[in-house]
Amino acid sequence: MGRYSEFGKAWWSRRWLETLEDMGWSSRLQRGRSYARQGNVLSVSVGLGTIQGRVQGSRRTPYRVSVDVKILGKSDWDKAVTAMASSASFAAELLAGAMPRNIEEAFSQCRASLFPSSAQDLRMACSCPDWAVPCKHVAAVLYALAVEFDLNPFLLFELRGRTREQLLEELREKRRGTSAAEMREESAVGSESGAQMEALKALVLASPQSFWTGDPRAVAAVPVDVARSAVPLALIERLGVPETWPRNGRFADGGFMEIMRSYYDAAAEYAMALAYAEAGGGCGADSSDVDDDGRVDYK
Amino acid sequence: MILHAAWLQERVEIFDDIRPADQGKLLIWAESARRLGYRARGRQADTPSHPFQASADQLLAALAPCLRQRPTKGRAVMFLPTADGYPVPSPAIIERARRVLAPTKLKRWTEPGAEVAEAAVTGDTAAVAGASDDDAVAAGPATSRGIGRFMVSGLLITPADAVRLLAVLPERPTAGWFGTAPQADTASPESLAAAAGDDLLFWAKASKLVLELIARHRFVPDIAMREERSTPHIASVWLPVLSSPDCAVRVASLARSMPWACRAAAAPPDDAGLELSPARSVLGSFIGAALNDTIKDALDVKLEDLATSGRELNHGMMPPFLDSWSSLMVEGMIFPACAWAAGLATRRMPFSNYSTNIARARTAVRSWLSAIGPTSGGFRTCFRLEPPPDGAGHWTLHFMLQAVDDPSVLVPAAQVWEESSSLLNFLDRRFENPQERLLTDLGRATRLFPALRRSLTGARPESCSLDTAGAYAFLREAAPLFEEAGLGVITPPWWDSARSARRRLGVRVSIQSSEVSRLSLNSIVEYDWQVALGDEVMTHEELRRLAELKVPLVQMRGEWVEINPTDIEAAIRFWKKRPRSEALTVREVLQMELAGPEGDSGAFAEGLPVVGIDLDARLGALLSQLTSNDRDRAAAAVRLPTPQGFVGELRDYQVRGVSWLWFMQNCGFGACLADDMGLGKTVQMIALLLHAREHGFLTAPALLVCPTSVVGNWQRELKRFAPDLRAYVHHGSARLGGDAFAEQAASADVVITTYSIVPRDVKALGLVEWGVLVLDEAQNIKNPGTKQSQSIRSLRADFRVALTGTPVENRLAELWSIMDFLNRGYLGSAEDFRRRYAIPIERYHNSKAADRLRRLTQPFIMRRVKTDPLIIQDLPEKQENKVFASLTREQVTLYEAVVKDTLRAIEEAEGIQRKGIVLAALLKLKQVCNHPAQFLRDKSSLPGRSGKLTRLAEMLEEAVTQGDRCLVFTQFAEMGALLQAHLAEVLGCEVAFLHGGVPRAAREDMIQRFQNGAAGPPVFVLSLKAGGTGLNLTRASYVFHFDRWWNPAVENQATDRAFRIGQTKNVQVYKFVCAGTVEERIDQLIEEKRALADQIVGTGENWLTELSNHELRDLFTLRNEDVADGDEV
């Protein structure tokens, strides 16, 4: 999984780590953190109320780590979701990829918390011989998890018992006050290829010529203006540096933008050169020597 | 052959939830005209070969020079429409086949019945069988339509090669674009080799769009599954972003107009289950593949160049790009993101080798990309800002959903919240998960514009209210960010116009021309300026008060206007400097006024735009007269009386033309008279010269440059209409040089010379400061780089006129050359013009550039067309003209030899024998005048050897470009055959030929197609005997008599083929005469003795034999002043 200089850039990921540190495991977590930083966490995955991970330890076979997180009850979820549905900002921010800052307000409705509130909420196990709980392998996994949270805040809900889809579905139901069972979705219309074949048949009957021509006037009327962008790299500037971009090494500071700029400039320059290339027709043999079938007559 | 192109999409399997990359090849193949009608012999495979396709080798010959890599030959299975099981040929190949196949072979596709026949679909193969409909079979004619599968062979082109090949095509490539070398100055014989079908042109348009996306940075890096040699791997790829409305609309419109021929194909391994994808996804696949492939090419090329040559240039050091890329590779061993970034620059490196956790990398990239919203199609959230209804109070930002490919489809948020299912139907459109879309976009929008957050506290937010400062912040800062992020924004209409130059704070310039005595483009005028907001002039005090207000949006006269703080600062700075009169020329004023805000008037001072120009009365009148259209010009320009020395009548529109030329001469502007052929450009020019002389404006002689083929014509027209003007022809091998020439020229009013003489005699011609410099058939200088154009440009003259009958405004290279000849520098340098106008218009169909160019050039061009009702009423129904052509050197030699032999022979002959000799001589001389090849019967090549033929081709080209149809009569069947072949090649269109040997049915077909066919032959050659009587050919608006029948009655009868009941157009008749030859002499005889013509001429040419030896000598002998220079024409 590579190495990371820092775990958890987003506020919710940092909050996750702070919560763990507040549980009094600071020193163990420290060891786990450097372990993770060295790249020993081979994989980490999240399921409903559970975390699974593989960590390379001193033995050849990686250790298996599993952490079970306490799942919230149905009525708790119901209250939390009702609270979230009452303000569009919750769903809006989540869907846009960020955990709403006031998320705990929604959970305070059910006197529960999205983040684990005590050590009792977590049950940790590791296949290593170490007697301590959490061992440094568990800690490493918990740290590595913070990076996953950055990318996908919905994982926090999953740990508490709701997948992304479940949560969104429940939010949708709350918004309109109906349940999924009452809904019926239209099924897709036949096979796509079949529909196309029908369209082709109809066309062949009506006007076989247009098989060849389409609507040439409409095609010609589509304007194209090959010109350099007024705002260079607008999209890349908008996207910013990817979360997973290294924060140390040669390309740490501004390296991503620098590389992208060189790519985009080279690509645009190439496109402009092609677009305005001299091409006064003709690319080969003299016309007078070529007959209708393109046979070149070398007399 | 007609080139076709079909996109063969390569389907990549989805692995681990990673998006399959767009991949594929373009199959270029061709229909062959000669093979049309072939049937394959022997047993056919399940999927038969396409029966009339060109071979891959023929394609290679045509295309290989345009491609970087030698393309591989390949095959594909195509679904094609069939009639009776045979593929329906494309309309383009039928047109092409008319030139190489007999009409009977084509009958099956060209008969009117074939096009409208309605029949059952009886599929050739099981794939489509089952659709046969008994009723239709019973009712319909013999033809049955269906769809068949055919194996098509051609060349497989990589997407990047396709872009390189196709993006440089003009909108409508002329014949000969493919497989031919560019021809320099000569009118090249257009090749019949290969032409593009509409499906190929479709991909050309798509390729151009791909280049635009790349140049405008409308793409992002991504990660996707690719398949190379059937091995799937995960790769770094580039993904086009088509979600901006202008892009989405264009893509949707292209997809709707895509010919089926573009997509009804699949590569053979897939053919078992040939699947047809919707046009949209096929287009998307091509754009995706072509964009990625082209960018990879760009970066790969760069890496390659750098690796090979970079080191040496950099003294052994690695150049920066390569250096950083290599480091990126190294870092990629540790950081997957670096490996991903390194992979973006090359197509050689599969990303999967470097990364251990693919799923994670995919999630990372996907979540990163989510910030720009969906990259193609679908719908998005749109924000519409409304000002406070009463001018004060709060602004409202409405939320709605918008269809990306049709921005006018808007669903208000209220309706989105009411929808209880996950599918919203609105105006026939499906919006899937509309609420989530709205919420997601609101979440993203909030990050860009935090003021939105307040409005999201409710469960179903519909809008957000803003104060004026907030509204301005939205318009100024958030709106552009929203658009970049793929969100829709609808601003009040005044906002967009406020941002255009004329509604902003800027400078009004007022211009004074009173100091200048005679205005020309280079005259320097004085100007004054004021700071203004739109039309309102602002004082310094007002400006200061505005600056203190610090309100960015103010209401003026009930309209909101943006006051940009930086503009205010610039205006105050500008005020302090008080710049005074730097030079401004009339040309600059014109360009500012004509090109409009997007033109050159941009930054005038301190970055302030010019928001208005006030002209004084004189300049204003000048400009309005310049820019008015023909009708207004007629009213505005002083109508000149017909010059005293002019023999004849000027028609009304001709008077207008002369008056306009006179006006332009007085202004010192070069002028282009581009009337349709037959409207009398020559006469107008002669009248102008007379008028100028009578008003003392022609103190120096005029120089007229024309093609050799019309020298004789000018000479005769001058003599006829202006016998007072002294004309001198500077041409031929005995022409004067140096001072002798200058002396001779000084004593003439008009010096006539030719395009080929000017570069040779540029020194002598440069000795004279010409009063007027006229270019006839000015399209001859279309190639600005040639010595000919350059030497003509170098001549000094007071007033320059270009005459041309071709619509110059549609031929941009010509237009620039002519405009630059007329008004040096007006359209900028040739290279500048190419970039700003020629390529955007011709290659990319840029209507803004076209409009700007039209505005700029329109004042200098007067063009009237025959079909203009104002002109028609002025024209007689039938107009007869003579065309005097010069002989070439070769023709002269042959002609003189015949005359010498004849004169010697008649001295010794008598009676019936003498009669025979005279008639034979007459025949031979006519043949020589027509063409040496006709006389010699040697099947030698035709171009450049006959003055008549050259002139005929020029005139036909003009007529055909205008969309007219023409009859060409000749009394010699063998000449007719030569004409047909030569004209078809030179004009690049179908030419029909009717002679005595054409069977009745074919003859009917020809006439029918000429008269009624939409794609009938524009030129119809007829032998006088076969076509002189009985036919009805009223579709023609031009009649050419290539040679003369010395009986006017016979000629008139032929002419009347076009001039019969049913003719609604004016008909122009041109009779060709070789100047100085027996043809001209007999023509004179007939003209002089018109009244006696019938008696003298009788029914044939026998009267000629009655002439005395002396008279015959006079009749036959060549008058040498009309002899051409030989090696040209």
Image (cartoon, coloured by chain):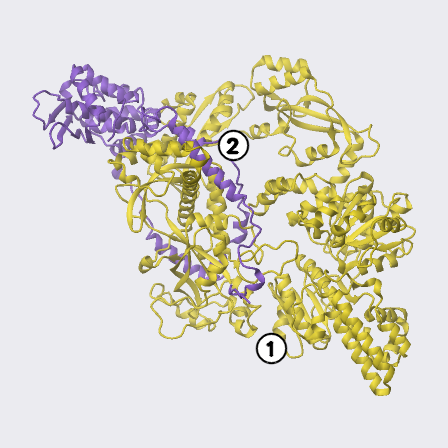
Chain colours: A purple, B yellow
Numbered label tally: 2
Count residues near mark 2 (Cα–Cα under 10 Å), then give few for <14, some for 14-19, many for 20+.
Answer: few
Are the residues tagged 2 and 1 within 8 Å (C-beta)? no
**To which chain does the residue with label 1 belong?**
B
* Image quarter hosting the C terminus of chain B: bottom right
Question: Is disc 1 surrounded by few (<14), some (14 to 19) or many (20+) residues within 10 Å?
Answer: few
Q: Amino acid at mark 1?
A: Ala
Q: In the rendered structure, which amino acid carries the disc numbered 2?
A: Ala
The secondary structure type at the circle numbered 1 is helix
Q: Is residue A52 left or right of residue B664?
A: left
Give x and y (percent) for residue A56.
16, 29
Residue at 62% across, 43% down: B850
- Residue B1049 figure quarter: bottom right
Foreground pick, B1043 / B141: B1043
Quadrant for residue A136, please give it.
top left
Q: Nearer the viewer, mark 2 or mark 1?
A: 2
- The residue that disc 1 covers is B1001
Residue corresponding to mark 2: A230
In terms of depth relative to the viewer, which is nearer, B1093 or B300? B300
